[in-house]
Structures are given as structure tokens and as C-alpha cells.
Amino acid sequence: MHTHTLLLLLLLKPGVCESCSLVVSPAGLVVKYGAPVSANCTSDTVTSMGWVPSQGESQVFRTGVKELTWRVDSLTDWNIKPQCFEMSEKGGQCARVLNVTVYKLPDRVSIRYLSHSGPVVEGHQYSLHCVVQNTAPIEHLRVTFFKVSTNGEQTVLYTQQLNNDIREPVNESFSLQFSPTSVDDRAQLCCSAMLDLGPQGPQPPPVMESECLNTTVHFAPEFSCSAKLQVREGEGLTCDVRGNPLPSVTWLRDGKMLTPPTHLSREDAGNYTLMALNRIGKANHTMEVEVLHDRAARGASCQAAGSATVALLLHQLIHWLY
């Protein structure tokens, strides 16, 4: 019996019979490696039907049935393609294939620079690598590089997905060419691996993140003060300068070095030039300083006080008349 059945199975082709009534439920399965799995195959009529292959067996075959279940206690075959078939007494035959995807989450996700360690320099290009270890199937893996700023805001830098139909677990490396700016100083660089197996897979799709790289960016000096500055008499003169390493700053007025004044007078108005320097580069900034006299503010205060006095006298006069 089994010998004749096996010979017939070798001739099976899915959907040979146009009136094939077989229905496989569910139509597809997404199964974690080592997990139990089952599916039903049903027919409109009593028939001879079977499943092939069944893990650990050559086939499962029954006669005089309308339904047959395929069941595996622990699925460990990465390439299994179960097929339900039926054979009629007239010699007709048909088959349905059950699509099975076996998956495994990564053992580890990590991120690193290729051939580099320590601080990075603004404007230079570096190769970031995200390594995903021992996962399957790789074609459903989506890797994302992202940045976490100092205030916790996440920014996606790049997302990559491979076109690879290997079903067994593999180690895979994904790369990103990264050119840092001063904004990236003290930010973190990370990557994540998402196994997106579609609606039949786990929801939401499982994601594993790497530990993040703390980023130190060396950059040339930058100024954050305006080209024109208004200050009041008695106030000081300041200008914010950023740079890494910390730059040295020199103040000049009319080409002469000076210490920025802390109590400005009207005579201190004019153009000031700042020169900032570190080992990455240098920058200059010139600003026009206007020193405001405080007399207008005092006049406004006196006018407000005078108006209040007039109002008070008018109120007393009305009270006396009535």
C-alpha cells in the first residue's frame, strides 16, 4: 500500500485537477523555529488523501476521509513545503501546497565603525556597520540606522532590506556612509533589526536594537551672535562661540587686541572682530555694536508717574463736588 502510494506521489503536481475541491486551512503559516504547528486539509467528498512531506515521516495517508490534519510538535525544517493531496477512484488527482515560513529572531544586533575608533571629525566620511547575528529568513529583515540627539529626539538616517531568498539563519552586515556635523556632537548612533513577516507573523513585528555609539564630533569654531548688536550703557559685551576642542577666542577693535568690556559706555560703540581657533579650523566674526543711552526709559517712567498723579487729583475733585 505504502509503496504504491509513494509512486503516485512522485507524479503529483499542485492543482492538476481543475475541479480540485481541496482546501488547506490556514492557507499559509509563519512559525517560530522549534514551535508546534498544524494545518487542516478538507475535501467536498469522501476520498483518499494525504500530506507529504511530514517532518520525521515520509508521508501521512488516509482512505475514506474528508479531512486530514498535518501536525508537527517541533518544526525544525527551514525548507519544508507540506503538500496535501487526494486521489479519486477514477484515477484523478490534485494537490494543494501549504506555504510555511520558519523564522528565528536575531541572537544579537550590534553597531560599530569600520576601521575607526575615538572622536570623528566634521565633514569626514565614516563607514558604520550594523551586524545582525543568526536570524532567518533574511529577506524579511529590515535594518534601520538612527540617531538620538542630546534631547532624546530620534532621527532615521537610513533603512535597508536585502533581496535574498536564503531560508536558513545567517549573519549579515549592513553599512551606512556617515558624514558627521557639529549638530551630531554628543548624539548617539544606533541600529535596529525588524523581522517583518507580514500579517501572518507576530504583531507588532519584533524589533531588536543595538547598543548605541556615543559620538564625539570635533569641529571648527562657530559663532552664534548677530552681525548687529544693541546694548545699554553699563552692560557687557558677549558672543557665544562653539567648537570642539574648545577654541581660543581673540577680540579686536580697529585691528588692536582687547579684553571685551564689561561696562559699556557710548564711546565703546563701533565694530568688533572675533577670531576663534582650534586644531580643526578657525573662524572670524565681525559685529557692529550700538550702545543705547538709558534716558528714554527714565522719561517713560516719569510720564507714567505724572499721569497717575493727575488721575488721583481728578478723582478727589469729583468727590468734593458731589
Image (cartoon, helix red, strand yellow):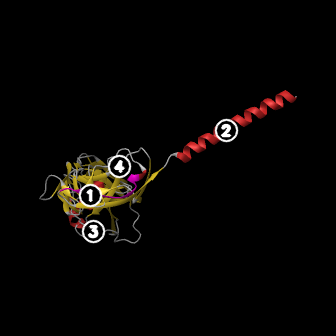
**Tag 2 near tag 4, CB within 8 Å:** no
First reached walking from the N terminus: tag 2 or tag 4: 4
Q: Bin the neighbour count of mark 1 within 10 Å (Cα to Cα): few under 14, some 14-19, many 20 and up.
A: few
Count of marks placed on residues = 4
Q: Is residue 279 left or right of residue 316?
A: left
Q: Residue furthest left?
A: 115
Label disc, if present, on residue 256 of the rendered structure: 1
Q: Find the magenta span and give its range.
A: 267-278
Q: CA distance from mark 2 to mark 3?
A: 107 Å
Q: Secondary structure at mark 3?
A: loop
Q: Is residue 222 left or right of residue 294?
A: left
Q: Which residue is mark 3?
A: 12
Q: Which residue is mark 2?
A: 306
Q: In the image, is residue 128 part of the stretch drawn in magenta?
A: no
- Residue visible at 30% across and 55% down? 183
Q: Bin the neighbour count of mark 3 within 10 Å (Cα to Cα): few under 14, some 14-19, many 20 and up.
A: some
**Tag 2 near tag 1, CB within 8 Å:** no
Q: Is residue 294 left or right of residue 315?
A: left
